[in-house]
Image: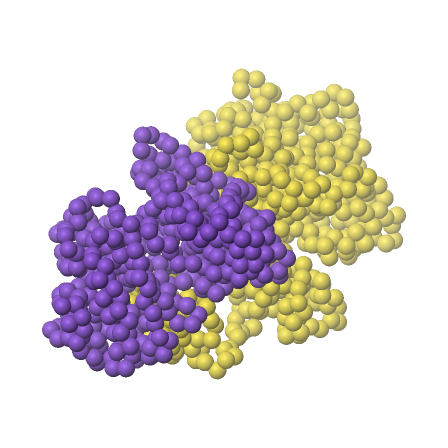
Amino acid sequence: MTESDKHRLMVPDDRVLAGGLMSVPILYRFRGPLDRAALSRALDRVVDRHAALRITYERAGLRRLREHVLPPGVHLPLSETVVSEPDEAERLILARMTEMFDPDGLPLTADLYRLADTEHLLLINVNHRVTDAWSNALIRRDLARFYNAETGVATEPLPVVEWLPGDYYAWRDARLAGEPGRRHAEYWDRQAPRLKWAGLRQRAEKFGERRPPSRTVDIAFVSGDVAALRELATAERTTLFAALLALWFSVLHAATEELGLVVCSIHANRIRPEAWNTVGQFANLTYLRVDLPAEPTFRDVLRLTRTTSLDAMAHQEYPIFNVVTHPGTTPRTVSRAGEVAFNMLATPPNADGAAGADFNGLEAVSLPFPAGVSSHFDLELFITPRPDGLSGVLRWAEGVYPPELVSAMADTYASMVSAVAQDPDVALSGFLKRFR
Amino acid sequence: MSNPDAGSPVLAVIERHARIRGDAPAILAPGDPAGLSYRRLSGRMHAVRAALTGLGVRPGHRVAVVPGEDADSAALLLGVLAAAACCPVNPLWSATETQDYLDTLDVALIVLADGAGTAAAQQVAAAKAPAVTLRFTGEDLVVEPQDGGRPAETAATGPYPDEALLLRTSGTTSIGKVVSLSAAGVVAAAQATVDAYHLTDSDRRFNIMPFFHVQGLVGSLIASLLPGGSIVCAPAPDPATALRHALDSEATWLSATPTMHRLMVRHVPRDRDWPGPLRFVRCGSGALTAGLRAELETGYGLPVVESYGMSEAHQIASTPLPGDPGAAGLVPTGSEVAVLDQHGQVSTAPDASGEIVIRGANVMHGYVWPPGLKSPFVRGGSAGDTEGAGWLRTGDLGRLLPDGSFLITGRVKEMINVGGEKVSPFEVEAAMLSHPAVAEAVAFGIPDPVRDEHLGAVLVLGPGATLGDEEFRTYLGQRLAPVKVPRVFLRRADIPVAESGKIQRGSLARVLAEELTAAGPTAESDGRTAPRTPVEAMLKGLWSLVLKREDIGVDNDFMALGGDSMAGMALLSLVEDSLGVAITPAELFTDITTIEAMAAAIGERTSGTTEGAGR
């Protein structure tokens, strides 16, 4: 632990140990002869490498916890359960993800479910307090590398972990206390009063109510369409991220007929390369608002999205909870603006999905989030880059929307991708009727 | 401190020897075989102490001594050490430097040795404290007060009641750092040398180290006297006569810095009964390379021991003498040795590596200057009995070996930071010295606007040898990681050394600046437009850091090079952190899309401010 870690030693309360919302799981399916001992050693090496995974909590009052970082050399127990069928495994996985983290244990658990001698599921359930999607990609990359090393495969050395989490927080705090912090505050003084509901909910949310379980629906992409979207983005001097977000705004416009739209976007927020190999919780949220002209075409939406997301990008490091402190907001207005989310996280260099699933002698698949777990968001679009294109999942809070609305949105998104790939100037008015 | 002798273990030692072996020689000089006996030395120390008391000096006061390198200066220093906190001053410092030092320490009195020369008197003329010249005439001590200065009684005392010796070490202020050692610490430090080399009353040290240096005063003078042996003070000998004097004076050991040894070993007197009573030679105050060690062993025909020490503790460790249990590295002599591992834990585990930490009776109290210095001791850490106060951080990097010895792998401060990669000059030097054409080699860091530093090397080739840059780079490339291969080689007849005889890797880039400029920068090899200004060069470094590629021209578009929003944000935060200029993502992806444009924007945005760009 560095000196700079000290400032986050006291955790305000024990909500950090809650399951469900704090669970950021990694899930693998392995087919083939799994070397369980090597896997266990590889997990220990991952924990050795990343200080954040060795954080433990000590009770320091009724609801307060004190963080400690254990020295390297701690053992992460790897449980093994024999299950008779996939359903049973899924039930156990969900149970693990929703239970509270052990306050005396490490901030992650590892469970192996044996379906057959040559078929296993591995759940690494990591506490959101110490990880985010980028960090989990690092964990996957490092685990595969260590497993291969432990089973005798020559491996490239891993890049050095340059900053500990505390180094990052200390750097960020110094920035926020200075000129960048002033700029961010100024930006949010302007933006915060413009936050609003997306306008999709059937009923208002009861503030503080228990989050419902989530359901998912897949969105399929045709690879030719993705290539066309990329070209369009380059021509407009923007990124695929902005193009896919513009499509999401377009679907929301079609579903609500609103012109002012707000989406919560999740950023990896690793804005110093020294933190690129560090496991920790650095991801941040920001709100993106576009105000569309009447009768917009897709290109209109794309250009507005580009401007909005570049503006927001400049302020992405501003902790989302600080937004509440700006005039014109309450925790409630800020929270309701997070109804709809867009989630397409950048992956760390050298840690893409393919490299993260290269386990010696095994057919390994990194599985998406299991459904059923609660989310902070009501409606969240996940886009994941794959070696062969993109995959999309729409996750929604059960009971908040009619299922037919959500499937119409997923369908509209998929068909809009194809329409835009053919004609970027397509008018959105044609899609409105799908929701009437 | 009511009984002054209780605070002066050094005087107690001398008095004991004066009783047991009063006529035995303690301090000699070449050409003076009788020298100063223990009885006379004891008398002189008492005389000095009485004189200081008469001048108003009280225990706890600090007394500066400007010594010569003769036997009388040695006696004078020991006398002052018995009476007050002794602050040796290098007669070669400038007058301003000396005055600053003396005023900062608020010394009660400045004592000039008769052998220090007239320059020393002028040097201290403007100091606040009164100065006095002490001269031994036969058995008498003549006290000659100089003009000026306020009464000694009014001087302050230091923070440590048992402070006995203050030594100046290198540092970033003009005065550097000042080490405070207790009398018991000084004796423990000297005893470490006695124990390491089994020194007895029949040993005689041939000393060429100055007395204002820890090795001269503690490791040489006091270490010789502790077991009742003797020391030959040879002021500033030339290399050719030093070894003859050592033979003439029947010395049993001598010690010098690596550079001094390198000069002396070429003058081993072949016409004499070499090595006479010499048992071994010691090398200290600098790392002994394997090549030089072999050269010294062959040239001297004597065991060569390498000692590891510093002003803060004197001798910490040494390689063993033949006959002692062998060891692969340095064996701790006066201190417990451990390492501060990468997690900030003090470790004594075999194969542990990190910054070397030491503790023991020989370790200093702390620094008394500059004020507000961060404690050099390891603090806190998690619970465990190897933790706690008392471990001094040495600033050296090392690895503990299973046989209880340890290796020094680098100097924390000398580590060269090549774009974030810490390179040990020792490792680079070992690879360079393994080439048969290379006689001497030193690696050092050259400030680089982009990568913090890049590697340079000074080479001294063997007689008649030639070695081309490219040939040598290829050779090193097979032995070292690319980042550790020097970019610039300078061939010289010798390695520049500082006044103390040490190689100062930290200042070589400055010392050799002109030669480095003449050696010229390397050109872009991929045909892209190379940076033309320091800001462009720095930006290119930042761009390649976030884009993970080197083939970047200053007119290339960020997006066309593969820059996405992640790389863009990383770039912009690096630019703001290092150049103080905020560029927005909208600008990066719209107008300021090349290094060229970014450098221009930075120029515009900083031109109105008084602070320059750059770090």
What scheme was used to colour the molecule? Answer: by chain
User: Hue of chain A?
Assistant: purple
- Residue under the point 59% across and 48% down: A37
* Image coords of residue B313 (percent x, y): 60, 37
- Find residue A200 and report its image quarter: bottom left
Front position in the image: B65 or B458: B458
Q: Is residue A171 left or right of residue B438?
A: left
The image quadrant where one finds the N terminus of chain A is top left
Q: Is residue A25 left or right of residue B585?
A: right
- Residue that lies at the very extreme toward the left in this rendered image: A294
* Image coords of residue B283 (percent x, y): 70, 47
- Residue that lies at the very extreme toward the top in this rendered image: B2
* Image coords of residue A436 (percent x, y): 13, 68
- Residue under the point 23% across and 73% down: A302
* Image coords of residue B560 (percent x, y): 38, 77
- Residue under the point 20% across and 56% down: A401
- Residue that lies at the very extreme toward the front in this rendered image: A84
In the rendered image, the vertical position of residue B233 relative to residue A392, given as above or below: above
Q: Is residue B544 left or right of residue A10?
A: right
| Residue B214 can be seen in this image | no
- Find residue B197 and report its image quarter: top right
Front position in the image: A426 or B469: A426
| Residue B309 can be seen in this image | yes
Front position in the image: A49 or B489: A49
- Residue under the point 64% across and 39% down: B316
In the rendered image, the vertical position of residue B106 relative to residue B162, given as above or below: below
How many discs appear? 0
User: Hue of chain B?
Assistant: yellow
Front position in the image: A200 or B419: A200
